[in-house]
Structure formats: C-alpha cells, structure tokens
Image (cartoon, rainbow, N blue to C red):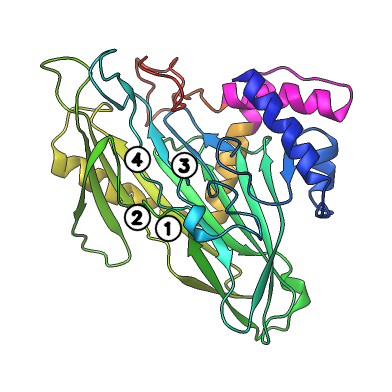
Amino acid sequence: RGDRAAVMLLLLLVVGTLGCTIPPDWQPQISAGDMLFSCGVPSDGFSANVGNGFLAGDVGCADGAGHPSASKSNARGSCGNLYVAGVFNGYRNITPSHRAVLPGVFSALVASVPLSSVQPLGAALDMRNGLFRNRTLVTSPTCPGLVVETRTYMHRTERNLAVFEIALVNASSYQSNVSCAVALDHCNLAADESKDLALTTESSSDPSVQLRKAVVLQPETKGLAKTEVQMAFQPLPSSVTLTLQTSSVLLLAVVVSSLEKNESSPAMQQRAFSMLQKYRQEGSGSLFAQHSRGWAALWASGVEAKGPTSVVGSVRSSLYYILSSRRLAVQHQPGWPHSRQLQWPHILGH
C-alpha cells in the first residue's frame, strides 16, 4: 500500500504540473505535503481512496472520466464503489473469498448542458481532512465563471456515514439574487449492479430517500449465514440549484451490516433510515467539523516528516492510507473484532 501511495503521489504531482493551474487556496496544503493534486480526476487504478475503517471506497470516475477528453462510455471501472469492513463474498480460497463490492451512489462529475460549458480546475486528496475534492469551472449565460466543488468523505467519527457535497466556491462573485443550475453526470454506469451482492430496492416512507438491501452471494465458509448490508441514501439528482442562500447541497448515505449487531433485516433497515434522518438534521457544517476533528486526532498520534515536498507527501500519503483503515471506537459505536483488517478491495480474504 505504501509503494502504491508513493507511485500515486508521483503521478499526481507530474500530472498536476501539466496544462492546469493549482487553485491558490489549495497551494499551502500542497506545498506542505498535505494534499495530492491532479488536473482532473485520476483514472482507474490510481483513483484516490477515502475511508474510516468501517466504510471505504474509491472516488471519482474510472478510466480518466474526470478529464475533458473522456466520455461517459469509458467511465465504468471502479467508479466510487464502496467496501464495508468484514463483508466478503466467495468461498474460502476456492472462489476465492474477497471484499464484496457495494455499488457507490455518489459517483458524479459536474457536467455541461446546452448553452453551458465546463472546465476541470483540479482534483485533490486532502489527506489532513480525509477528503476528496473535485473543482470545476461552469460557464453559462446566467452564471458565468461559476466555480463548483464536489467533496466526498467517509465520516471519521460516525463510521456508518458517507458524505457527498456540491458547493459554490466563488459565491462572493455574484449578486444576492443569483440562482445557478449545476448538472451532474452520473459516471457510474453500473450503480445498480454487483458481482458480489444480491441487491434489492426497498420502499421508503420518505420519497427523498432510497433504501437498498444487499446480501452476499456466497458466504466464506459452509454453514455461515450470508452477510447482509442495509443502505439508506439520498440519490444523486440530475442537477442541483446553487444560490447565495443555498450555496451547497449535501447528500448522505448510511450503511449498516449484520456483523455490527444481532438484529432482524427490518430492524437493520430502520436503523439505517433513522441514522440518515438524524445526520440530515445536523447539516454540512456540523458533520464536517466533527469529521475534521476526528482526523486531527488521528494525525496527532502519527508520525511527522520534514524535507522536500515530494518526500513529505510520500510519507504522508502512506500514513494516510494506514490511518484511513483504522476504526475508532466511540461511546455509541463500539469497536468490533475486525478492527485490524484493512478494507481495501485488493486484499483477498482476511
């Protein structure tokens, strides 16, 4: 993992020097070795990962879909898939057992529509805050020079929570009555498919929320119950409207598994739904503040490096992937026996 992180850092730094300008507000973190930068969303195989030890996933779109020359037809690949700690599919080393792929629901790019155009301004992995950021310039007749940023993270202290936010960066450039429509391109063409899980869409009492049940196809050993995952999430819309009063749109997903506690399938579903409603009430500012404090505490227990940016960045990126696999035990969400396992999909079995 450390070698892969170092390679990714080198590639991102090289790509980041070609054909684009680093956003000025990102420069201090990049210079300090706290942020990895690319002109666009890195292609599959070098995409960034975000995780909290319970939930993890690759972010952005696969096969270069974040670059201007890419088309949606080649954007399948990983595309923001999720992995849940302890959830495996496959029989022992025969099939073999491997991390089950849960299709991600927050894989999207800011897209162009008639009379508008988009230009990637850069993508970055903010390692200090466990956050992936993708920034885009949108030009339209009503909102020229609109800078929009998508932000993706797995909440550091609320382990069941995945967060996706679309935000207006340059709000000060507009009048108080501005209203800008931002289109989203759903780049995960396989969002309702999984080679590891049987997926079922469940009805919800809230029309703005979707419920999904996922059961592994084959347990790891004979006689073992099939692990179940329940997911409650706000589906990605085709577009969002940003104003000075509503300068960001927050979308949340809650994932729970049958490995956490002994409960029925309906109880799991209700738990996921109730948690989602609770987090929605907290709002973007509160959720990110908690998340950021959690990451600050993690880094305080780690190793610091000094030297050239490339060296510091290599060390920090390796540490980042280790820390993002560490699950914290908190009062209302105790740890569990699998805490030492890494959740990345490349590790077969345990």
Instruction: Kindly identify which numbered label has been placed on residue 102.
Output: 4
Q: Residue furthest right?
A: 308
- Start and end of the magenta stretch? 296-323
Reading the chain from its start, which is encountered first: label 1 or label 4?
Answer: 4
Task: Give the labeled residue for mark 3.
Answer: 78
Between marks 3 and 1 in the image, the one whose residue lies nearer the viewer? 3
Secondary structure at numbered mark 2: helix
Task: Give the labeled residue for mark 1.
Answer: 281
Assess whether residue 321 is covered by the magenta stretch. Answer: yes
Q: Main secondary structure of the magenta part?
A: helix
Assess whether residue 265 is covered by the magenta stretch. Answer: no
Neighbour tally class for label 4: few under 14, some 14-19, many 20 plus, Cα within 10 Å: many
Real-space Cα distance between discs 1 and 4?
A: 26 Å
Relative to 310, 211 lies left or right: left
Secondary structure at numbered mark 3: loop
Task: Give the labeled residue for mark 2.
Answer: 277
Between marks 1 and 4 in the image, the one whose residue lies nearer the viewer? 4
**Foreground pick, 26 / 347:** 347
The amino acid type of the residue labelled 2 equals: Gln
Real-space Cα distance between discs 4 and 3?
A: 11 Å
Secondary structure at numbered mark 1: helix
Relative to 237, 51 lies left or right: right
Q: Position of residue 6 (x, y in %)?
A: 70, 24
